[in-house]
Amino acid sequence: MAVVHRTTMTPGKLELLAAWLPGRPWYRGPGTGTAPQPARAGGFRLDDPRGEVGIEFMAVSDGAGDRQVTYLVPLTYRGAPLDGAERALIGTSEHGVLGRRWIYDGTHDPVLVERLYALVRGEAVPQAQSESDTPDPTVAGWSAQTGPSGPASILTVSDGPDTTDVLVRTPAGELTLSVRRVLRPAPEPDGGAAPLLGHVTAEWTLADGTRARGRYAEIRA
């Protein structure tokens, strides 16, 4: 199980995200001249079985515009650069215990994508965002697939106005793993062009302090 260290990161995650978010095609902020105001709103972690890569799904609220929007930012933390992922690098930070960490948009990281697919299939245990060795029972994966299990490898990654779509190769064939970037409370219609084969639901905190629940990710054929 991953250890959550009680220490500092310089620069901090939110500081890095404030500079990174405006360049995303799914960012809904007011545009030039107004900086994002990111704040933690929830999320969870997954374990890397090899213990090498930190994996976090962070819900981030931003009140820079006319209304607060909550984004989902999957993050990976590495002790060395990830080959071929230069465009996915959010930044580097000095960790008080682990030293320099390379922080990536996790939709481009094969370790996060494989673990997310495992979560949908019920083969990974979601962990609390801020506690070590503590499962998070509020995070749920659901899968309609009954075929062979196994790893998911990245083929392509594309950003849209609401999701980042990761085309993956699995033992069940090629599937699209859509990571929701703009979080919305459930229920939601299954209006996708392809059948829904699975999803992950989790919680986050709204501007008024109440808890919302909705889909963090979906899998379609």
Image: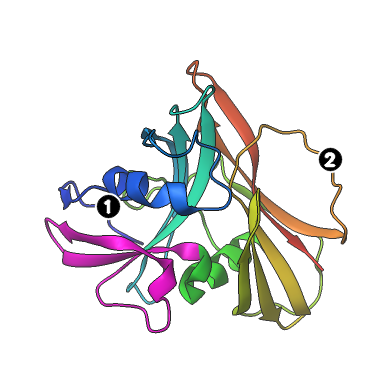
Residue 9 image point, x, y percent: 18, 51
> Label 1, on which residue?
4
Foreground pick, 133 / 199 = 199
Count of picture labels: 2
Residue on which the image places disc 2: 189
What residue type is disc 2 on?
Pro
Position in image of residue 62 (x %, y %): 45, 32
Q: Nearer the viewer, mark 2 or mark 1?
A: 2
Q: Does residue 113 show up?
A: yes
Side of 55 where 77 appears, left or right: left
Q: Residues within 10 Å of mark 2 (few under 14, many from 20)?
A: few
Does the stretch in magenta take in 94? yes
Q: Residues within 10 Å of mark 1 (few under 14, many from 20)?
A: some
Q: Is residue 16 magenta?
A: no
Secondary element at tag 1: loop
Which residue does the image show at 43% across and 71% down from the upper left?
87
Q: At numbered mark 2, what does the secondary structure look like: helix, strand or loop?
A: loop
Quarter-wise, where is residue 50 in the image?
bottom left
Q: Residue at x 65, y 48 (%)?
A: 162
Kindly identify the residue that appears in the image at 35 percent across and 44 percent down: 18
Q: Magenta stretch? A: 77-106
